[in-house]
Amino acid sequence: MSDILATIPLSAIRVFEAAARLKSFTRAAEELGITQAAVSWQVKALERRLDQALFLRRPREVALTASGERLSRAATEAMSILRTALADLSETGEGVLAITSLTTFANQWLAPRIGAFQLQHPQIAVRLDTSSRIVDLARENIDVALRSGSGDWPGLESHYLFPNIHTPVCTPAMRERLGGLAQPEALLNAPLIGVPEEWEVWFAAAGVGSQRQGAATPRLTGDSQTLEVASAIGGQGVALACPFFFAADIAAGRLVAPFEIYAHYDDGYWLAYPADRARAPKIKAFRDWLLACVADDPAIAPYSRRGS
């Protein structure tokens, strides 16, 4: 059976992919640096070769037919894979490493350390994006992700970093104001900061969940641990926090963690990137550096084994 790809120029697929993605022959021409007439001619030639229409021509726009939609999905994926492979083969480790990370992970743990990575790899610039949104690494211009979850993401290679655990933190003055916080029960009516459901998990772990009926609910909830712990440092109450992220504040005495009781969540923190880019020099360099950092962090060491 003959290979149909041998009879269709790659340039025709490239032009079709751009026109389908942009929904415009004119914008496709601008992106590709050719004329609108050349785009139209390439699309018509492809339609003749396939003996079916790929676009519906309208006065001011074009729309994909059912066949065009099917080919568009495949062409976009194929061109994305091809661009990635060519970029990885042509790079020598230089360029920009784009990282997407959860806000607290980036602010509290990665940011104080990333300078060491840049000193080791001065040819790699770092672009750090913080967001709670799960970025599609196969389609967006991001190289690696630092995220929480199960680590089971189709098409991605994942490396476990550390568990997702929380414990109460507050200022030394707040601890004294609350009578020293000798027992978990002292927090039942304390000014709490954070997500109510997460506090319920902690109180259950502390063995006082059954005493929560009628107790105080959190007075403040932020969209990140960084904001919630900042409120705690400001003397507003007791926040739940991952001790790895705020180890420096605890060591400096700005915060105290009164109890060695931790709420454990099913998900953990992971490094993830497209499996087909595992050998990209900049990704490999960051992976090796990050895993070494995690292994050397004394705050993480007691909990480094998964499930501990």
Image (cartoon, helix red, strand yellow):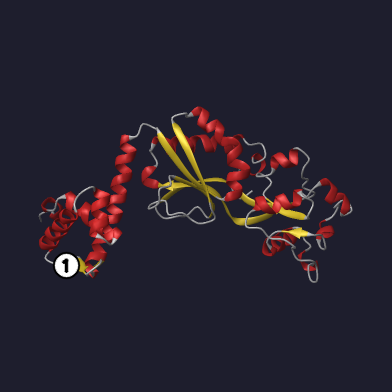
Q: Residues within 10 Å of mark 1 (few under 14, many from 20)?
A: some
- Tell me residue 83's x, y (percent): 30, 45
Q: Quadrant of residue 204?
A: bottom right
Q: Is residue 234 above or below residue 114?
A: below
- Tell me residue 18's x, y (percent): 26, 55
Helix, strand or loop at label 1? It is: loop
Q: In the rendered view, does 261 fall on the left or right side of 135?
A: right
Q: Tag 1: residue type?
A: Ala
Q: In the rendered view, does 302 fall on the left or right side of 191?
A: left
Q: Who's the residue at 40% across and 32% down the image? A: 94
Q: Nearer the viewer, residue 259 or 285?
A: 285
Q: Who's the residue at 71% across and 63% down the image? A: 200
Q: Is residue 245 above or below residue 295?
A: below
Answer yes or no: is residue 138 visible: yes
* Residue under numbered circle 1: 53
Q: Nearer the viewer, residue 77 or 59?
A: 59
Residue at far right of view? 179
- Tell me residue 143's x, y (percent): 43, 44
Residue at far front of view? 60
Q: In the rendered view, does 161 fall on the left or right side of 55?
A: right
- Tell me residue 27's x, y (percent): 27, 56
Answer yes or no: is residue 18 visible: no
Q: Who's the residue at 20% across and 49% down the image? A: 34
Q: Nearer the viewer, residue 22 or 219?
A: 22
Q: Quadrant of the N terminus?
A: bottom left
Q: Who's the residue at 58% across and 41% down the image? A: 110
